[in-house]
Amino acid sequence: MQDFKGRTAVITGGASGIGLAVARRLGEEGANVVIGDIEAEALERAATALDNSGIPVEPVLTDVSKREEIVALADRATERFGDIHFLHNNAGVTTTGLAEELTDLQWEWVMDVNLNSVVWGCREFLPRMKAHGQPAHIVNTASMAGMSGGPLMAPYFTTKFAVVGLSEGLWHEGQITQSNVGISVLCPAFVRTGIARSDRNQPDGMGGWVAAGSEHASRFGEFLSAGVDGGIEPSDVAATVLAAVQAEKLWILTHPESSDSIERRMTAITGTGIPPEVRNMGQ
Ligand SMILES: NC(=O)c1ccc[n+]([C@@H]2O[C@H](COP(=O)([O-])OP(=O)(O)OC[C@H]3O[C@@H](n4cnc5c(N)ncnc54)[C@H](O)[C@@H]3O)[C@@H](O)[C@H]2O)c1
């Protein structure tokens, strides 16, 4: 997909961070943008800011962990702007703790927001995009955590690896069906956003994003927050996303230095089968 002028882009998690930056970047290219997000106040603020910049915008309060709300997001976008040309499945959350320390509810929350929503989004929007037949594109946000594993975020690694697998599968299906819908998967390392404050969007009664009473997890939480605060700007990610979509790239990497860890992982898999290192993440 080359040209966004007069096209319609739907972005989940579009009220802040990477999603808002992509919405703004595509709006500057002339797109109508529909931002879906669970956080009502941030959504209104984002819509006002985009509107003030002259970008046609529709904010839709959406909890992507509920399939029917993803359908409603697609319907609302179509009612307001007509055909949809771009979908960014981007909303995401994290928790930290040893896999067995996290509660079932914490696991389910990350699985629904980070993975099931992406499956549902692709299954809802793809047929609509194929039906109109114009150039279209879906970007799924995974992470470098979908490219090489590490400790204390097992639900996050699980979902992000799965989003990479889903996206690769869709890309291959697009090739054999000569689809008009391109597919990309976004795999950033640290970006300066609100991701380490994910618990602001947790359902009631979940008890925060750090496993209760876990010494490992609270140290890791500090490491993660510091990494995110020192990350690259969301606007840089958005510029990379736009260029990659226009170049029809499948994998979108935003941190050149992170290629090393992918190469080390692949070399270990095909070589000794022994992981190259225990990743030091604040332990
Ligand atoms: N920031 C990083 O370092 C980093 C690195 C790799 C990948 N990512 C991924 O980038 C994506 C965007 O996150 P971000 O870093 O911009 O963080 P962020 O917290 O700033 O943005 C995430 C957005 O998703 C929204 N959201 C959360 N739960 C939702 C739900 N149930 N329904 C709808 N919206 C919901 C939030 O309100 C927020 O606006 C996530 O998928 C995240 O995993 C972030």
Image (cartoon, rainbow, N blue to C red):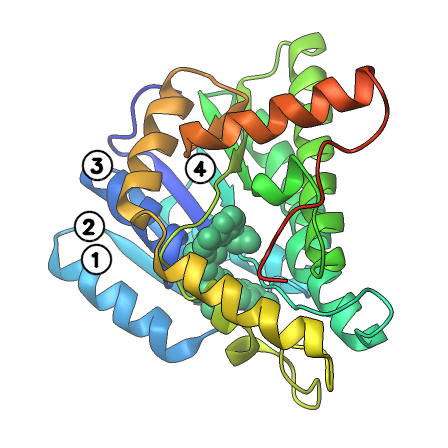
The image shows residue 26 at horizontal and vertical percentages of 28, 39
Report the amino acid beneath label 1. Answer: Leu
Query: What residue is rendered at 21% in x and 57% in y?
Result: 50
Circles 1 and 2: CB distance less than 8 Å?
A: yes
**Real-space CA distance between mark 4 and mark 1, rounded to the nearest whole angstrom:** 21 Å
The image shows residue 189 at horizontal and vertical percentages of 48, 43
Q: Which label belongs to residue 158?
A: none
Circles 3 and 4: CB distance less than 8 Å?
A: no
Disc with the residue nearer the chain's start (4 vs 1): 1
Q: Which label belongs to residue 55?
A: 2
Secondary structure state at the residue bearing disc 1: helix
Disc with the residue nearer the chain's start (2 vs 3): 3
Disc with the residue nearer the chain's start (2 vs 4): 2
How busy is the neighbourhood of tag 3: few (under 14 within 10 Å), some, or many (20 plus)?
A: some
Query: What residue is rendered at 65% in x and 24% in y?
Result: 264
**Real-space CA distance between mark 1 and mark 2, rounded to the nearest whole angstrom:** 5 Å
Instruction: Give the residue number, with chain letter if any, for mark 4.
Output: 83
Secondary structure state at the residue bearing disc 4: loop
For the C terminus, the quadrant is: bottom right
Instruction: Give the residue number, with chain letter if any, for mark 3.
Output: 30
